Image (spheres, helix red, strand yellow):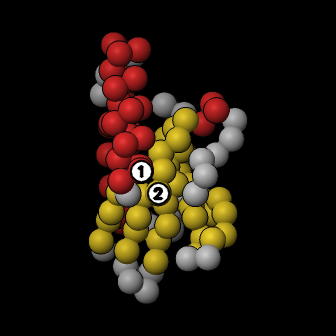
């Protein structure tokens, strides 16, 4: 399966990791560890996430990173065996990202 992280999601991941490193010194690697685990799970079970929204290009799914309270939004196209991470967003914001 092709696993891709959009440019937008990559920037969000970098910002979150920078914040996490500065503000959670006792758990600096927690966000990246959870993100890595989510990627591993999605590579084997790409339809794991719950459907968050229906889009023109198919459903957008969401996986929650429980310990850091972040949400990973992605689209999976089974016919192409292609998964794209669209956004990584802080759950406590109370609203989702524009997708």
Q: Establish if 49 lies above or below 34.
A: below
Count every numbered label the image shows and give the total: 2
The picture quadrant where one finds residue 27 is: top left
* Label 2, residues with CA under 10 Å away: few <14, some 14-19, many ≥20: many
Residue 43 appears in which quarter of the rendering? bottom left
Q: Is residue 38 visible?
A: no
Residue at 40 percent of width and 68 percent of height: 83
For the residues labelled 1 and 2, the Cα–Cα distance comes to 7 Å
The picture places residue 26, in percent across and down from the top left corner, at: 34, 13
Q: Secondary structure at mark 2?
A: strand
**Residue at the farthest bottom position:** 79
* Residue closest to the eye, 15 or 2: 15
Sequence-first tag of 1 and 2: 1
The label nearer to you, 1 versus 2, is 1
Q: Secondary structure at mark 1?
A: helix
Name the residue located 48 percent from the left edge and 31 percent from the top edge.
68
| Front position in the image: 42 or 19 | 19
Which class describes the residues within 10 Å of circle 1: few (<14), some (14-19), or many (20+)? few
Which label number is shown at residue 86? 2
Q: Is residue 2 visible?
A: yes
Quadrant placement of the N terminus? bottom left
Residue name at image x 63 percent, y 71 percent: 55
What number is the disc on residue 8?
A: 1
Q: Nearer the viewer, residue 21 or 49?
A: 21
Horizontal placement of 3 versus 94: left or right? left
Residue 96 horizontal side relative to residue 19, left or right: right
Look at the numbered discs 1 and 2 and tell me whether their residues touch, using CB distance below 8 Å: yes
The image position of residue 4, as x and y in percent, is: 33, 63
């Amino acid at each position: 399966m092709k696993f891709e992280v959009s440019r937008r999601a990559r920037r969000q991941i970098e910002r979150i990791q920078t914040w996490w490193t500065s503000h959670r010194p006792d758990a600096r690697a927690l966000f990246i560890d959870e993100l890595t685990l989510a990627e591993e799970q999605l590579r084997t079970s790409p339809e794991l996430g719950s459907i968050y929204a229906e889009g023109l290009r198919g459903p957008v799914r969401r996986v929650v990173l429980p310990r850091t309270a972040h949400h990973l939004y992605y689209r999976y196209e089974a016919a192409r065996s292609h998964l794209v991470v669209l956004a990584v967003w802080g759950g406590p914001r109370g609203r989702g990202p524009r997708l």
